[in-house]
Amino acid sequence: MKLLVSRHETISSTLGNKIGQAGIDIQKISVLIMNCQYQVAVSSYNNEREALYVRNKHT
C-alpha cells in the first residue's frame, strides 16, 4: 500500500512539473508575441513619422 501511494505521488509530481514547464513555455511565447507586436507598432509609427516628414518637406 505504501508503494502505491509513493508511486502515485511521483506520477502527480511529474505531471505537476510538466504542467509547470508548459506554463513557463506559454509565458515565454506570449512575451515573444508581445515583443513582436511592440516592434511592429514602433516600426509602423516610425514609418508614419517618416512619411509625414517627407510630405511636409515636399510642400
Image: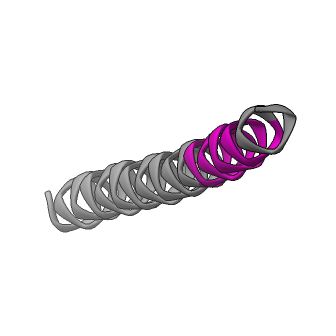
Residue 54 horizontal/vertical position (percent): 26, 67
Q: Would you place residue 9 above or below residue 56 in this image?
A: above
- In the displayed structure, does residue 28 sit left or right of residue 59? right
Residue 42 horizontal/vertical position (percent): 45, 52
7 or 35, nearer to the observer: 7
Write down the quadrant of residue 9 in the picture. top right
Residue lying at 85% horizontally and 33% vertically, measured from the top left: 2
| Magenta-tinted stretch | 6-21
Name above or below for residue 40 compared with residue 45. below
| Nearer the observer, 7 or 31 | 7
Q: In this view, does 25 lie to the left or right of 29?
A: right
Q: Quadrant of the N terminus?
A: top right
Q: What residue is shown at x 14% (from left), y 57% (from top)?
A: 59
The answer to whether 32 appears left or right of 2 in the picture is left
Considering the whole magenta stretch, tell me its main secondary structure: helix
Q: Which colour scheme is used?
A: one colour
Along the horizontal axis of the image, is 27 left or right of 52? right
Image spot of residue 28 (x, y percent): 60, 55
